[in-house]
Structures are given as C-alpha cells and as structure tokens.
Image: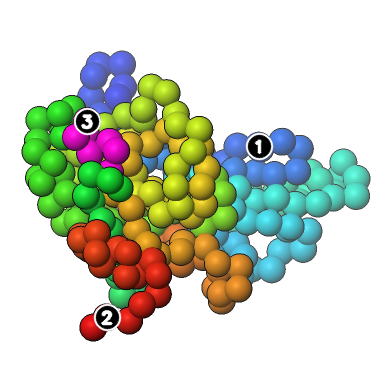
C-alpha cells in the first residue's frame, strides 16, 4: 500500500484505519494515494462485508482505496452498537484478505479505440507534455496493464488504473463543457471512458464506439471493478463500422 514518509525522510507503510463518515457510516481507509494492491483489498473487503449480512447495513461502497459501509439505526444507542459492529467487521475482513494476491484473474475486456486526430483532440498535447511522439503515446497506452479500479461519477464511468508511468499527465486546467460518449481520456495515472456526453477535464486521446452503459443490457455496465482491460487501436473505418453495427466483411 502507499507509503508515508516519517520525520527523518524514511519510508513507512500506511496503516489502514477505520474512520467515521457521517453519523451513519464508517470508512476503511487503505492508502493515501492510488495503489493497485489497496484497490484490490478494498474490493475483497467489500465482498466480505456484503456476504456477512450484518443487520442494519444499507450499502457497501468500494472506492479506489476505501470501503464505506452505510447503516441505519433507530436510536443513538443502536447507532453506537452498529458502528462498533461494522468497525469490527471491516477489520476482520481486512485481516482475511491478501489484496492483489487474492485477485481472481478474469478475461480482459477488449475496448477498440480509434486514436486518430478527429477522435483525439488532446493527443498531440499529451505527446508534447511527455516528450513522446503521438505514436508512442498510443503504443504505451494500448500496452499498459489496465484494470478497473471503480465505477463512479456517472453510471458506467470506469476509473482504470495501470497506466504506463511515462503517460502521467494532470487533468486539463479548464474542463470542457462536453465530451462525447466513448471518449477515452487519461489523467493522474488513470484512464477513463466517458459513457455519456458529459463535461470532462481529462485529456482525450481517443474514442471507442462501444456503449459503456446500456440500461437495456444485463449487466448494464460494460465494465466492473476489478476487470482487466485491453485497449485495441482501430482505424476510423472500423470505428464507423462498429458504431453503426454493420458486420465485418
């Protein structure tokens, strides 16, 4: 998990802790920053808490490096008792999980992406910021070991970790008022794919014709936390064919 620095400049490991999240929720914090092992641990802990079926729990939310458990209570005394029970449950689940070592390998979800300039308004800027060519940015992005960290922001919106460190760029200084559905964008060591036309401040380097969220599909979200992802570069002609639903010739 992400290390802290002590007063002498040495490195020490972050100590997981349970903290209040309002008067009817507890949060287990596993790391200070993005950490793939802590993210895997968060998913496993959340699964164990859900499976425990503890009375009064209304929601269990695994985020990038945290797990938040929401509960209901009819009185202050009941809230105190449930807070204590949830805290014990979180720590017990944490003690039983090995984080990334417990990951059950899944088949990667392939996402075709057209990285050509008409779909990649920020590719040249990312290349300039990283000292790479646009072709190298595409190659490194497609070759990265991507994995979905969490779904959030809007339904089906994946926060995807594993981006090659050479592609680390911050969010744009000024977000755009609208990004098209399927926009593939990077920022802060992650990749995101926009399921709907929404505002967005990430750097768009391509676009996929796939629908990331479809309420008529089961499951509605194409991706889920923990899914490995492979981005496959495609030309504009294939993008248009896939977007129209035409079969390959």
Quadrant of the drawing holding the C terminus: bottom left
- Mark 1 element type: strand
Between discs 2 and 1, the one toward the N terminus = 1
Whole-number angstrom distance, CA of label 2 to CA of label 1: 54 Å
Specify the quadrant of the image occupied by residue 189: top left
Whole-number angstrom distance, CA of label 3 to CA of label 2: 33 Å
| Residue at figure coordinates x 56%, y 49% from the top left | 154
Instruction: Give the labeled residue for mark 3.
Output: 125
Q: Nearer the viewer, mark 3 or mark 2?
A: 2
Q: Which residues are magenta?
A: 120-126
Mark 1: give few (<14), some (14-19) or many (20+) Cα within 10 Å: some
Q: Nearer the viewer, mark 2 or mark 1?
A: 2
Residue 205 in percent (x, y) is at 27, 44
Instruction: Give the labeled residue for mark 2.
Output: 248
Q: Does 231 appear above or below 12?
A: below
Residue closer to the observer: 130 or 50? 130
Quadrant of the drawing holding the N terminus: top left
Instruction: Give the labeled residue for mark 1.
Output: 20
């Amino acid at each position: 998990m992400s290390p802290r620095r002590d007063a002498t400049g040495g490195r020490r490991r972050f100590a997981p802790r349970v903290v209040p999240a309002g008067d009817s929720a507890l949060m287990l914090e596993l790391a200070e920053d993005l950490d793939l092992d802590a993210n895997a641990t968060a998913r496993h802990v959340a699964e164990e808490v859900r499976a425990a079926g503890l009375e009064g729990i209304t929601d269990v939310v695994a985020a990038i490096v945290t797990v938040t458990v929401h509960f209901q209570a009819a009185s202050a005394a009941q809230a105190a008792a449930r807070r204590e029970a949830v805290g014990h449950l979180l720590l017990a689940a944490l003690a039983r999980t090995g984080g990334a070592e417990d990951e059950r390998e899944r088949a990667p979800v392939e996402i075709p992406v057209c990285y050509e300039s008409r779909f990649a308004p920020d590719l040249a800027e990312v290349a300039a910021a990283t000292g790479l060519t646009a072709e190298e940015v595409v190659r490194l992005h497609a070759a990265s070991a991507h994995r979905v960290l969490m779904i959030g922001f809007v339904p089906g919106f994946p926060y995807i970790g594993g981006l090659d460190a050479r592609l680390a760029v911050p969010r744009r200084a000024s977000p755009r008022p609208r990004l098209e559905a399927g926009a593939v964008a990077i920022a802060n060591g992650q990749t995101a794919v926009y399921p709907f036309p929404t505002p967005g401040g990430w750097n768009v380097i391509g676009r996929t014709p796939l629908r990331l969220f479809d309420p008529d599909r089961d499951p509605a979200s194409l991706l889920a936390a923990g899914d490995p992802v492979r981005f496959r570069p495609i030309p504009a002609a294939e993008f248009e064919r896939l977007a129209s639903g035409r079969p390959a010739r």
